Amino acid sequence: MQVYGLVGNPVGHSLSPPMHEAAYETHELDARYVTFEPEPKALRTAIEGADALGIRGLNVTIPFKQDVLDLVEPDDLAERIGAVNTVDFSGDRPTGHNTDAGGARRALEEQGNATLHGSTAVVVGAGGAGRAVAFALADAGSTVHVVNRTVPKAAELAEAVPGATGHGLDALSELVPAADVLVNATSVGMEEDVSPVPADDLHDGLVVLDAVYAPLETRLLRDADAAGATTVDGAWMLLYQGAEAFERWTGLDAPIDAMNDTLRARLRSHR
């Protein structure tokens, strides 16, 4: 049996196990996806143990995405982002990758029909998700404006991303009306029915991705839809980052429909 999994703390809420196991079932793979919840001080032991036990691959989530960088051989993108969310054990040494970036790009291009090359993009949030999204957009040819509650953090990320600029939240009303793409990479809208972006700034030429996936329809997406914008919910980013990990580990095409159906059924059951 092939074993894959997720390492984080906590991981009980994760939707990755049913999504990945739907992919294994579709391809008739003898495989399981399990969760691991080590204490932070035991992360090195967990990664080394997974390698020794023959685990094929691991996804990595909070709070370990940055710490695991020192325990694997990161690829160029993961190193630039400063975070790993996928570990592959197929080589001589575990390699680290960041599929959040590809997940965001694919969600925007395939579900939002966004043309990223030459576009102007606003990323709200400079945390882990914001870093992945900002690098993904810049690599795709977008001009990126990072907006964050803490301005120095936005400036720090902007300095690392080619051609990017950093701003405080007060810049939204200047930046969003002129933007082609807007991504919320914060948790705003998850616990309360609020939006990180004023509704009046949204417009019909905008593609809006909200990385929040619970709830699927956030206040930001409702406001964007009312303004005539194209909306992309966060489950698409979650799906595509998982699909990229599956393909890296197995060499097979990810069964997007099966994974998406399972993911959305699970989200609906938790509402």
Image (tube, grey):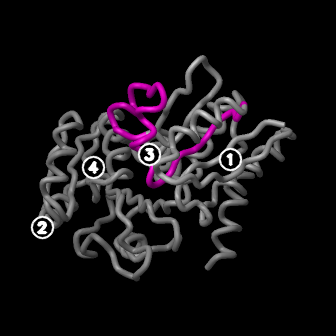
Is 135 rendered above or below residue 20?
above
Identify the amino acid type marked 4.
Answer: Ala
Q: Earlier in the sequence, mark 1 or mark 2?
A: 2
Q: Which residues are magenta?
A: 54-83
Residue with the mark numbered 4: 121
Residue denoted by label 1: 256
- Give the Cα distance between marks 4 and 1: 26 Å
Disc 4 residue crowd, few under 14, some 14–19, many 20+, Cα 10 Å = many
Q: Residues within 10 Å of mark 1 (few under 14, many from 20)?
A: some
Q: Nearer the viewer, residue 59 or 155?
A: 59
Disc number lying in front (4 or 2): 2
In the visual, does 97 lie left or right of 255?
Answer: left
What residue is drawn where x is 78% and y is 46%? Answer: 32
Instruction: Write down the residue under mark 2.
Output: 170
Residue 271 position, x and y percent, is 61, 79
Which residue is label 3 attached to?
Answer: 65
> In the image, is residue 65 above or below residue 207?
above
Q: CA distance from mark 4 to mark 3?
A: 25 Å
Give the residue displayed 13% in from the left and 58% down from the top: 151
Q: Earlier in the sequence, mark 4 or mark 1?
A: 4
Decide which of tag 3 and tag 2 comes sooner along the chain: 3
